[in-house]
Image: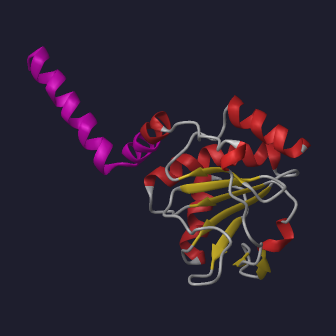
Amino acid sequence: MSKKTLVNVVLIVAVASFFVTPVGYYGKVWLNKIFAKTPTVIAVENREKIKDYEWELKDPNWNVFNFNKSKGKVVFVNFWASWRLPCAAELQEIQEVYNKYKDTVDFYIITNEERAPVEEFMIKNKFTFPVTYLFIGKKSPLEILEAPASYLLNKKGEVVIKELDIADWDNNTIDTLLQDLIKE
């Protein structure tokens, strides 16, 4: 077998593994993380304030609770789906932010999926943040966005970030912003 043929075979195997093996899944997640950008902070004068905090959601045990428990707090809201590859990449970043700020920021990592596949996804990816389940069709103070998408609210209920795509959340810009918002 010539060197050129061997190189071609190796390339074909590598490309095929990218599409049909678990190695490919992790490679695609990694590529999504590479192309994620730092979310844009909305200028103070352009920030919209949510009108109320009335929003019924379900916790990881499917107990109903109200979003109004977060009034006056810094709040991070992310919409995700286990079957969306960009979400898997973004949730790795969100897990890191959650680890740092879980005691000072309220996290709502929201999905509209059934409980069983979500629990399986959480275990497989070793995510420990609390999952929040969405009631479809219920009143919400925020626009329900297509996953992956996120909001960051300050203590006054103003939307500081509205990100409509995968984002890089675990960086110095977001760390500084969260620390400033917590101090307000």
Q: Which residues are magenta?
A: 1-29
Residue at the image point whose x is 55% and y is 61% from the top:
80
Q: Nearer the viewer, residue 166 or 61?
A: 166
Up-down: is 153 above or below 184?
below
Up-down: is 89 above or below 119?
above
Up-down: is 60 above or below 136?
above
- How is the rendered protein coloured? secondary structure
> Which quarter of the rendering shows the N terminus?
top left
Up-down: is 1 above or below 80?
above
Residue extending furthest front?
45
In the rendered image, which quarter is residue 16 located in? top left
Residue at the image point whose x is 47% and y is 33% from the top:
34
Residue at the image point whose x is 83% and y is 65% from the top:
70
Query: Residue 17 location, x and y as percent?
Result: 30, 42
Query: Residue 102 location, x and y as percent?
Result: 82, 51
Q: Most prominent secondary structure in the magenta stretch?
A: helix
In the rendered image, which quarter is residue 66 located in? bottom right
Residue at the image point whose x is 65% and y is 81% from the top:
139
Q: How many marks?
A: 0
Query: Residue 74 location, x and y as percent?
Result: 81, 54
> Which quarter of the rendering shows the C terminus?
top right
Query: Residue 171 location, x and y as percent?
Result: 67, 32
Residue extending furthest top?
3
Residue 14 forms part of the magenta stretch: yes
Residue 166 forms part of the magenta stretch: no
Residue extending furthest right?
183
